[in-house]
C-alpha cells in the first residue's frame, strides 16, 4: 500500500467532481470515526483534480477516478495497485492493455436511483400521462378518459441483473408485475420467474411486456438489440435503455418504432455522447431522451464505497465489487 512517511494512506482523485468527492471523504471520516480505523484520520489526498495533467503518474498507487479520465493516466502509472472507479460502467478501462492492478466498480449505491428512473417512465405510460396533459392544454380543455394499461399483471424483462437490475425486482413486484431476466450465465436470480441466456433473446423478448436494458458494454452485447429483437416485442412495449448505447442498433429501433412494433423508447445512453443534434432520435415522437442521467453517482456515495474498500485495502482483505478484465464487467 502507499503510505506517506507519517503513515497516511495516499490517494489521488481524478474526477469532474474531485473536490466534492474529497470533501465527502473528509466529512465521512470526521463524522463516522467509529466505522474507520485510526489510519484514515490521516488519509492523505495528494491530488483532487479534474485534469489528468495534475497527476504525478510515477507515484500513483491508489487512484479514485472517473474511468474516462483514469484511462488517460493509467497506462503510465507503473506503480498503480488499485483503482476505485466512480462509475458503474468502465468500458474506457477495459479497452486498455494494462491490467496489472485491482479495479473496483461503483456498486451498491445506484439501484435506488435506477428504480426512480425506470418506474417514472413505466408509470407515465401505464397511466397515459402524456395524453391527459395534452387534453388539458387544449383550448377548450378536453374531458376524456384516455386509454391506460396498468402495470399489474404485466411482465417486466430486465437485461443485465447485477446490483442495479436486482434493485428493480421488488418494485416491480409491488406493482403486481412478473419479472424475467436475461444474463450471460442465465443463473437464477431471486424474484424472477425465468432467466434467459443471450442465445434465447427472441424468447425473452416475446415473453416481456416492457424491457429494460442494463447490460454492460462488452463485445458480446454490441448490436445485440437489432431487428430480430425489436420485431419480437409487443406493440404496447416500452423499451428503456439505461445500460450502454452500443447494445442497440439505432436504425433497427427507429424502424420498429415507425412500424408500431413497440410503443415507445426511453433512451439514456448512446453510441456517441452527447447525442449529435442531427440524430433522428431527438425529433422522433416515440423517443424520450434523458442525456445519461438515469443513475448518476453522487459524491457522498462514491466516498462511502471508496472508504469501505480503502479499509479493506489497508488490512489486506479482498476488495468489494472487483471487476474482471477478461469479462469486461
Image: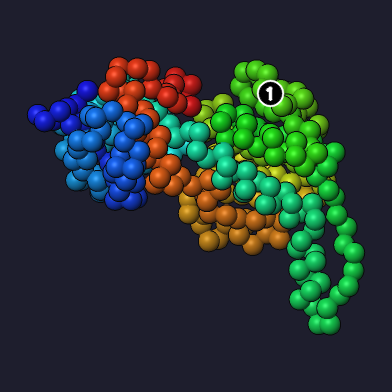
Which coloring applies here?
rainbow
Give how far across and how far down residue 138 sits, in percent: 79, 78
For residue 206, what is the image quadrant? Answer: top right
Residue 190 horizontal side relative to residue 39, left or right? right
In terms of depth relative to the viewer, which is nearer, 174 or 98? 174
Question: Which residue has dot 1 on it?
Answer: 190
Q: Quadrant of the N terminus?
A: top left
Give how far across and how far down residue 233 sits, in percent: 78, 39
In terms of depth relative to the viewer, which is nearer, 236 or 12? 12
Q: Residue furthest left?
A: 5
> Quick check: can you spot residue 15?
no
Residue plotted at (53% across, 54% down)? 291
Residue 279 horizontal side relative to residue 6, left or right? right
Residue plotted at (85% across, 54% down)? 148
In terms of depth relative to the viewer, which is nearer, 248 or 325? 325
Give how far across and how far down residue 139 sits, in percent: 81, 82
Q: Helix, strand or loop at disc 1?
A: loop
For residue 198, what is the image quadrant? Answer: top right
Q: Residue furthest bottom?
A: 140
> Quick check: can you spot residue 294?
yes
Residue plotted at (65% across, 56% down)? 288
Residue 209 horizontal side relative to residue 71, left or right? right
Residue 217 horizontal side relative to residue 24, left or right? right
Residue plotted at (79% across, 37% down)? 177
Give how far across and how far down residue 20 sits, in percent: 33, 51
Amino acid at each position: 500500500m502507499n503510505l506517506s512517511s507519517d503513515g497516511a494512506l495516499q490517494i489521488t482523485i481524478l474526477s469532474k467532481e474531485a473536490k466534492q468527492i474529497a470533501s465527502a471523504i473528509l466529512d465521512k471520516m470526521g463524522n463516522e470515526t467509529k466505522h474507520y480505523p485510526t489510519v484514515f484520520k490521516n488519509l492523505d489526498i495528494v491530488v483532487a483534480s479534474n485534469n489528468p495533467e495534475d497527476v504525478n503518474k510515477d507515484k500513483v498507487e491508489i487512484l479514485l477516478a472517473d474511468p474516462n479520465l483514469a484511462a488517460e493516466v493509467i497506462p503510465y502509472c507503473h506503480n498503480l495497485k488499485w483503482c476505485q472507479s466512480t462509475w458503474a460502467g468502465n468500458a474506457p478501462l477495459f479497452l486498455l492493455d494494462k491490467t496489472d492492478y485491482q479495479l473496483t466498480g461503483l456498486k451498491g449505491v445506484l439501484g435506488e436511483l435506477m428504480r426512480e428512473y425506470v418506474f417514472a417512465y413505466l408509470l407515465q405510460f401505464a397511466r397515459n400521462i402524456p395524453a391527459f396533459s395534452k387534453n388539458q392544454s387544449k383550448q377548450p380543455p378536453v374531458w376524456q378518459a384516455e386509454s391506460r394499461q396498468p402495470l399489474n399483471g404485466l411482465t417486466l424483462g430486465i437485461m443485465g441483473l447485477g446490483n442495479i437490475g436486482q434493485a428493480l425486482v421488488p418494485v416491480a413486484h409491488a406493482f403486481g408485475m412478473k419479472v424475467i431476466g436475461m444474463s450471460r450465465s442465465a443463473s437464477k436470480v431471486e424474484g424472477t420467474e425465468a432467466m434467459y441466456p443471450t442465445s434465447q433473446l427472441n424468447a425473452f423478448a416475446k415473453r416481456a411486456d416492457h424491457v429494460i436494458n442494463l447490460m454492460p458494454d462488452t463485445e458480446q452485447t454490441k448490436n445485440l438489440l437489432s431487428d430480430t429483437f425489436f420485431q419480437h416485442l409487443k406493440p404496447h412495449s416500452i423499451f428503456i435503455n439505461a445500460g450502454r448505447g452500443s447494445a442497440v442498433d439505432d436504425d433497427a429501433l427507429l424502424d420498429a418504432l415507425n412500424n408500431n412494433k413497440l410503443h415507445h423508447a426511453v433512451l439514456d445512453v448512446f453510441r456517441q455522447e452527447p447525442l449529435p443534434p442531427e440524430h433522428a432520435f431527438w425529433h422522433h415522437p416515440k423517443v424520450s431522451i434523458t442525456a445519461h442521467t438515469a443513475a448518476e453517482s453522487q459524491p457522498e456515495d462514491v466516498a462511502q464505497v471508496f472508504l469501505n474498500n480503502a479499509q479493506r485495502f489497508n488490512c489486506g482483505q479482498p476488495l468489494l465489487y472487483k471487476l474482471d478484465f477478461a469479462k469486461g464487467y
